[in-house]
Amino acid sequence: RRPPPISPATSIMVSIRQATVHDLLQMQTTNLWCLPENYQMKYYFYHLLSWPQLLWVAEDFDGKIVGYVLAKMEEDESQPKHGHITSLSVLRTHRKRGIATALMRRSQQEMQDVFDAEYVSLHVRKSNRAAFHLYSVTLNYTVNDVEKGYYADGEDAYDMRCYFKGNGGASHKEEEEASSEEQAEEPPTEAMKKLEIATAS
């Protein structure tokens, strides 16, 4: 006897939860599938050990990780206290379901509640119009600057920010999620240089 088919409602059930060390390999796999900016495993460990409250995953009904947000708190004391989105990715099979929005809001909420951040920043490719729509329209980010040749292939990046205090933070209107949801914080070569300095000190 054949098993009953999975209903549409069950097939799209996804839970948003805080990431654990056991999720890191699947997070890295999702990154490799979706983004051109990739990181070594020790960079994921560095985030998890330093800011575990800011890493969140989307887990499908079968236990598969289908999306994640990798974030951190910036440590430059000359600037106001703020967080940064290192990487955001959702598998193409699970996009346009509000998953990226939910992941971002959870991480941003922790930045406010745990670290008392004033704002959060990120970088996005100028050519990634869908991701720009997600950040600017759905998540209420604004362009702070344009960084020329930011990515390894020479493409420019928008430096975007979302201020928590005075603009309602994550409590903004709901919008349909963009069809492409991705953001990498910086080219891996520079990221790893910073990590080597941090771990050596």
Image (cartoon, rainbow, N blue to C red):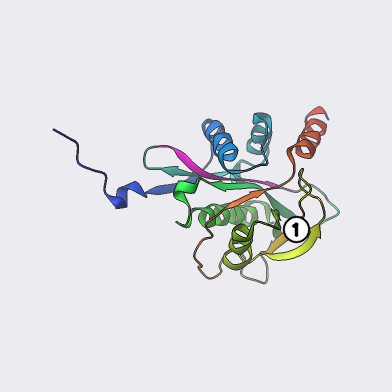
Numbered disc 1: secondary structure: strand
Residue under the image location 49 percent in, 65 percent down: 176
Mark yes or no: residue 118 visible: no
Depth check, front residue: 61 or 75: 61
Say whether residue 182 is left or right of residue 75: left
Mark yes or no: residue 99 visible: yes
Residue under the image location 77 percent in, 43 percent down: 152
In this rendering, the answer to whether 99 lies above or below 50 is below
Say whether residue 39 is left or right of residue 76: left
Q: How many marks?
A: 1
Residue under the image location 19 percent in, 36 percent down: 3
Magenta-colored span: 63-73
What x and y, as percent, mark residue 169?
A: 62, 65
Callout 1 environment at 10 Å: few (<14), some (14 to 19), or many (20+)? many
Q: Amino acid at mark 1?
A: Asp
| Residue 68 lies in the magenta stretch | yes
Say whether residue 32 is left or right of residue 152: left
Q: Is the magenta region chiefly helix, strand or loop?
A: strand
- Residue under numbered circle 1: 159
Residue 27: image quadrant is top right
What x and y, as percent, mark residue 192?
A: 76, 34
Furthest-right residue in this view: 78
Residue under the image location 82 percent in, 56 percent down: 79
Quadrant where the C terminus is found in the figure: top right
What x and y, as percent, mark residue 85?
A: 66, 50
| Residue 169 lies in the magenta stretch | no
Quadrant where the N terminus is found in the figure: top left
Furthest-left residue in this view: 1
Depth check, front residue: 189 or 68: 189
